[in-house]
Amino acid sequence: MKKELEILIQMQKFDTVIGKKNVLTKELPQQLNSLKQSLLDADEAVNTTKSELDENQKDQKLKELDIADNNAKITKYKNQLLTIETNKEYKALNSEINHLEKKNSGVDDELIVLMETESELRDRLKENNEAQQKASDELKANEKKLEKEIQEVQKDIEELKSKRNKLAAGLPRDLIRRYGNLIKNRNRKAVVFNDNNACSGCGYTIRPQVDIDMKARNSVIYCESCGRILVDHFENN
């Protein structure tokens, strides 16, 4: 039985490392996905700002065309004023000229706002381009490294599992099954030790007789609370 307990202790050591490696199998892909998402977000920000800038430019051109069209009409009407003979027609045409000039003044104000917005958009685009370049550089610098680490972690896990399974071959099937259930359901801690007269897995107080049986290592002792396999210590095993 001492040999079986030693095997269980060694298996637990492997499974503890496997547990830590499993954490990395989640964290490393998350890091890689985060870098990729940062670049996607930066690309979207650049494209959105470019789109807004394009719309701004189109609006400015339309405003400029409106002003040019109104100016052409004003020039035309002013020339017509020179040939009008009645006062009524003169007032009507002059009123239309004033209306167009007032309209141009409003369009000029709108154009100024668009130009100010354009300046802000160009500043934002510059910042977005810088953020995009930074995200791209970070991805290029870390992508292959993280992919390699992910592969290495997976390889390490497979090797550790292989070593653990070879050890398990020397144990009875029912004990292997119970160990596996504990690993699965007890936070990857199937074998625990006496920690100041308490189970290191759940903290339950170990009775003196249980402590004596545990130190004897003549049988597999289970925690009376959490059901984990109790051993006196992990050292020198």
Image: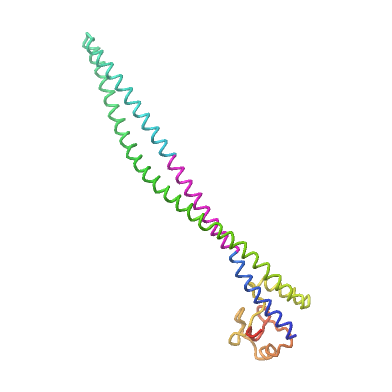
Give the tally of numbered discs: 0
Residue 194 shown left or right of residue 4 in the figure: left
Q: Residue at x 31, y 30 (%)?
A: 107
Screen quadrant of the C terminus: bottom right
* Residue 150 found in image quarter: bottom right
What's drawn in magenta, residue-wise? Answer: 25-50
Where residue 36 appears, as percent x and y from the top left, is 53, 53
Q: Residue at x 45, y 50 (%)?
A: 133
Residue 186 shown left or right of residue 81 in the figure: right
* Residue 201 found in image quarter: bottom right
Q: Residue at x 58, y 59 (%)?
A: 147
Where residue 130 appears, as percent x and y from the top left, is 42, 50
Q: Is residue 111 above or below residue 36?
A: above
Furthest-top residue in view? 85
Q: Is residue 52 above or below residue 162?
A: above
Q: Nearer the viewer, residue 151 or 170?
A: 151
Q: Is residue 218 above or below residue 112?
A: below
Q: Is residue 118 magenta?
A: no
Where residue 172 appears, as percent x and y from the top left, is 78, 78
Residue 19 shown left or right of residue 164 in the figure: left
Provide the major secondary structure of the magenta segment. Answer: helix
Residue 5 shown left or right of residue 93 in the figure: right
Screen quadrant of the N terminus: bottom right
Structure colour scheme: rainbow
Where residue 163 appears, as percent x and y from the top left, is 70, 73
* Residue 12 found in image quarter: bottom right
